[in-house]
Image (cartoon, coloured by chain):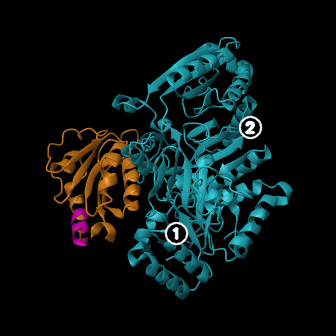
Chain colours: A orange, B cyan
Amino acid sequence: MTTRRDMLKWGAVLPALGTGWHGAFAAAPQGLDALVLDTRYPGALDLADASMPVWRFAGDVTPLWTGHLSARWKEPGHVLGGITGSDALFVLETLAEHRGRRVVSRLALDLPRVNGVQAYRWIIAPHHPSVTA
Amino acid sequence: MTIPSGMTEATFADGLAAMRDVVGAEWVFDQPADLNTYRDFYSVFWGEPEERLASAAAAPANVEQVQALVRIANERRIPIYPISTGRNLGYGGSAPVLSGSVVLDLKRMDRVLEVNEDNCSCLVEPGVSFFDMYRHLRESGSKLMMSVPDPGWGSLVGNALDSGGGYTVAGYRGHWEAVCGIEAVMPDGELLRTGMGALPGSETWQQYRLGIGPCLDGLFRQSSLGVVTKMGFWLYPMPESMLSASVSVMRFEDLEELVRIANELEYGNVFNGMPGFSSPVLARENPIVMSMVPEPEVMNAMVAETGLPAWSFASNFYGPERVVREQWAYMQSRFAHIPGVRFAETGFVRLPLTPEDMERIHKPRFGIPSLEIFSVGSRGYGDFNPSDGHIWFSAVIPRSGQGIIAANRVMRAECERLGLDLFMFVPSVTCWTRSFVLFAAVPVYKDATRNRELRDKVREVIATCASHGWGEYRCPPAFMDNVMDAYSFGEHKLRRVNEAIKDALDPNGVLSAGRYGVWPRHLREGRGA
């Protein structure tokens, strides 16, 4: 069960990791069920920490949605962390809100923009009773 | 909290309490963080007092709950605004047209009720997304293909009700054209079924659209007259193959003939896929923005200099390979008399698609929903440079060569005069088979000053287009009144008849007030202000 305390914990842990690429990946926060990495940003392929499922994509959220999230986000739980472009985050946030989930942490990273798109580190966690119970 | 104008807090609170009794407390939302979902992220009023905001939202799980919520709203005159999934970004999203409305979020009604393989049809609830339907079809081993918009995250029902379009076959890709049978909760809470659905025991609800008497389906298109709770669609039998080809001509003067023959071939069913008309020489700097059409001699000189065609017609053929190859051969024979004409087969795919095909195709042309467009054509939330989103400008123009040239020149000149930016401009979109739609994406901002200027400019463009006889078929809420104003024949008889119907069916004016310029009597004077 995801509690408010969990959400606060996840919301607090990411900013402490710093805004650089290595800080972002050096220690994925405990409690995440999966991590999403946007391979348009250099470094996303290098992450070795595989203590949780790591889903990589190159900006197009479609395979992530159809392959993983559409089904998982119908069920209770599932906290997702990610380092993606803001365009992908916008899509994921919209999809998440539709399924009773919310961005509980969002931090712009000191990474070069790719095609003008800013990279963010974020966590999406369930908040509606239908997916927290 | 924003509460409906003219309503006491006590009445509104009583209404929400009654709604909670119906759907459960967890499915009524009135906290700011929850209501964020129901903002229009591409609103041209973003952050201004005029931004259209929901007061609350309620998410029913079934038809009976929708009926109960509508009755609760009617009894207390609480404005309500139904959405299916609210994903029509650029046309209003999930935000109501009238601030203070309670959004009726139908996302929980997400059942695919029937897929009839023999009839090539389906019946769905409004919360079924294109992704849901695609998965259902594939997992059930269906031999059917649907038409999807791009992006494909919206609802079949919502997109059809908004007159959305896809990229596949004529008769299907205009999504409203593929509708067969509607169930709607009327403002009094009663249930209406259109077409053969009105006949108890009928097995033809998804076979014959018209039923008896006036066809009432149109009451629910872009309307404020009912909450659609079921909708039937015709689906296309999965074709054996799809062939793509292009016909290019090298002179300014050849456009009229190119479009005339293409129209004849499409209306005669020689090809069935979505055509495209473009100018390679005018779009060489940006493939999704056609620059101003110059004078003939200038354009012909550009063609000579670059070697690029003046105009190009792309066609798609869905069907058995033997058939589509013959159709393509016949098509070439029809254009062969044009001097310098070039033909090219640009793609051929056999279905079912292989994983390799999936990597290279434009998925919506095969009825496969996708979100890819967001990673190539849109800025995301939190990244407001150069734009915070966009609105669509979509005017219906004549389907002719002259139609393309006139619309291009007028729109280009207006945008230059007004300093209006476009990041996409295609004057000849063909989701609908008998007309072109001048399609333009206009950037919007999270800056009130810029958006105020933007609104004024867009209103000028609407008026200019109307003066040429070009009306928008769909628009964001900020411009619905302006667009409806342009349809002024008979001293605005269209709007007046719509208002008479509104008054008759929704005398308390609770449902979707102001949608597409039709306001209930008590808000008509100020247009919701």
Q: Amino acid at mark 1?
A: Val
B75 is higher (above) or lower (below) than B149: below
Asked whether A99 or B70 is in front, the reply is B70
Q: Give the image quarter of residue B372.
A: top left
Magenta span covers which residues?
Answer: A4-11
Dominant secondary-structure state across the stretch colored magenta: helix
| Disc number placed over residue B103 in the picture, else none | 1
Residue B451 position within the rendered picture, expressed as x and y whole percent measured from the top left? 58, 56
Count of marks overlaid on the render = 2
Q: Give the image quarter of residue B143.
A: top left
Q: Chain of mark 1?
A: B
B529 is higher (above) or lower (below) than A120: below
Asked whether A46 or B414 is in front, the reply is A46
Q: Label 1's element?
A: strand
| Disc number placed over residue B398 in the picture, else none | 2
Q: Amino acid at mark 2?
A: Pro
Task: Work out how far the residue at label 1 is from the one at label 2, CA to CA, in angstroms.
Answer: 37 Å
